[in-house]
Image: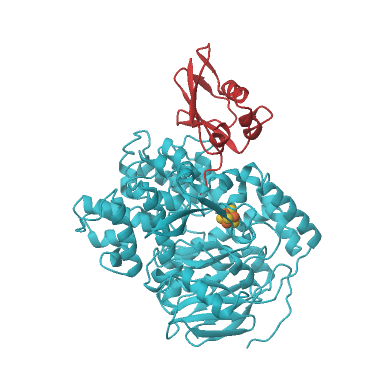
Chain colours: A red, B cyan
Amino acid sequence: MKITIEYYGIPRQRVGIASETYEFDRDEMGIHDVIRAVASKHPAFEKHCMDDGIVNKHMTVNLNGNQFFHSEDGIARDGDALLILSMDAGG
Amino acid sequence: MLEDRVSKANGYHQQYLEINVSNGVATRHELDTTLLQQSIGGSGLGTHLLLEHESWKHDPLAAEASIVFAFSPLVGSPLTTSAKFAVVSRSPLTGRINDSLASSTFAIAGKRTGNDALLIKGRAVSPSILVIEENQISLKPAEHLWGLSAEDAELQLREEFGNKFSFAVIGPAGEQLVRYATISHSGRHAGRGGSGAVLGAKNIKAVAVRGNQRAAWHDTEGLIAQARNLSQRSFGPATEKYRELGTAANVLIFNRLNCLPTRNFQKGSFEKAGELSPEAMNIAHEKIRESCAACTIGCTHVYSIPVDGRPSRARIEYENLFALGPLCEVSDQQTVLQASQLCDYYGLDTISTGGTIAFAMECVERGFLNETWLTFGNGDALLQAIHMIGRGEGIGVRLAQGSRTLAMELGNNTIAFAPQVKGLELPGYEPRALQTMALGFAVGTRGADHNRSGAYEVDFSEEVDRRNAKVHQARLAVETEDKAAIMDSLILCKFLRGVFDDYFAECATMLNLITGWRLESSDLISTAKGIIDAKKRFNILCGWSPEEDTLPERMLTSALADDRDARLNRETLETLVTAYNLERGWDEAGFLPGSSAGT
Ligand code: SF4
């Protein structure tokens, strides 16, 4: 399955790109595991945006522009887009 | 000259000054400890003083109206971002309570005059500078400053008075009584609700303050340790976004989620949003980062732009950018930067300026307003409209009243798409796509407001479906308002909020270190509720009615054009508002226990 990762705010600053696609040899997988794959490819992301193996409390994850999953316990499927962004929306 | 007196309470001078600028008479009033514990300072204290002075009885631009500069117990302490003050008055834009906050040395110098607040009434016979130097109060002529931008006037004031004074100044918009004019000081702005017009109506171009009175601290050592710890955390990941990209970091993600109000709230995304993102601006323009006084974060990103062939600078924040860019469908970076700069020059609230102009653009498009040059996407028209508002010329005179008044004049049910609640133009959060925020806007005591309600935080969490509001979101909206009420009364910058693990407990600790009180989290939560009750009481006395707690009709009858799932109907919003009222301990309609219409 193909998952597009879109980076916004600080995650984009750390990763240095706006988006990229990951291919996995499965039909669906936990958002948590997708984030692990991102972290293993981007050490700067892991260092600055994660604590204890999950995105830190200053980041959040959104699936397809719909539901937010701060605890990353949702499921991603083929064609999904995972948005990773800075938590604090205020301005 | 007023008599010297000894300060009694740690963190406070326990007094405020009432100045009548009609005759230059100043009166000192005591503030008792119980009242200070109930209102803290800033917005809370300012609201209390307005109630005490029965300010609801007067037109906000009448001589009898009061305007309060309220300081707080944290001002002057080493706590990061604490150099803030609140300007509180009845708003000429909404007719309801208005409290705008800003940071600068004005807060520190104002408190050092030996007062916890300055309450100004009356009307000077001619343009004047109100000078408060501890016990000496005087009015000096300001004819030579009239017509100058706040920045130019402040430069001149500095030359005349010296660097030991700090100044709060209005620009030409305040002089022209534009109903969303700001009060400025050192490049910062008390922005929303038109406090600049209230000062302008009093013929006061500037307030100059200086003093050496310091309020004592209960536990100086503990306070310094706490301040160090807070500063340390303010350098961490919680504030990274503000430091690296500024508040404009919202642009791209809001656009992706269809929350970026575009074309007078007809759409939630703008195809050219990328051109206005800070990521793109950083490539195209030189940028420096600035801070308010006593701030370790520094969220202000200032871009270099050439204007008329000369180098110039423009401050950009998300709200300026959304209101002067996507909302008017203007995508040219230079134009949006220049529009933002012009608002600062005239002393105009950027959100209300952009909101009113975008509304006028839609009225032109639909044939309700005969200003055919004022069209969506036309950057030159945007700049021209701002000049006309600031100078009080042509259509600018009508735009200066805000979108609600303009809609009432135009008729044809244009009020259905005027982007305002209680007369205050909506900030850059599309309510149909962020429905906890929609509730926050509807019930906000000062109108559609993202600073007194941080309900958007709820929408960006896994606790809710942001486009399908449920009743439990009312409780979450109340919690964000309670937090903001404390932050706005202490006062600390909202951009610090991410660093706190236990928000109310840490706020209580800071307040206790300064005052010696023994407050706990639960005390502060009660205080927050009391402050919000006081604001509501003020509004009820002004003539508030439950029908005001709503959104523009279009937002309740049509889905977002580019996100059909983003829809909100009147029944849902009314259910949320009722749940909110009950959660606050008010009756279903929103009246406080024991109050009713007109009481
Ligand atoms: S974070 Fe920004 S707005 Fe807040 S005090 Fe610092 S510079 Fe001012």
* Image location of residue B45, percent across then percent down: 59, 67
**In this view of the protein, can residue B374 be seen by the observer?**
yes
**In this view of the protein, can residue B422 be seen by the observer?**
no
Left or right of residue B408, residue B209 in this image: right
Give the farthest residue toward the top. Answer: A25
Quarter the N terminus of chain B occupies: bottom right
Left or right of residue B386, residue B292 in this image: right
Say above or below: B92 vs A48: below
Query: Within the image, what quadrant is residue B448 found in?
Result: bottom left
Give the farthest residue toward the right. Answer: B221
Left or right of residue B385, residue B350 in this image: right
* Image location of residue B105, percent across then percent down: 61, 67
Front-most of residues B282 and A80: B282
* Image location of residue B582, percent across then percent down: 51, 49
Give the farthest residue toward the front. Answer: B309
Residue depicted at 36% across the width and 67% down the height? B390
Quadrant of the image where one finds ligand 1: bottom right
Say above or below: B205 vs B40: below
Residue depicted at 66% across the width and 47% down the height? B235
* Image location of residue A41, percent across then percent down: 60, 23
Left or right of residue B50, residue B448 in this image: left
Quarter the C terminus of chain B occupies: bottom left
Say above or below: B300 vs A21: below
Front-most of residues B101 and B410: B101
Front-most of residues B233 and B3: B233
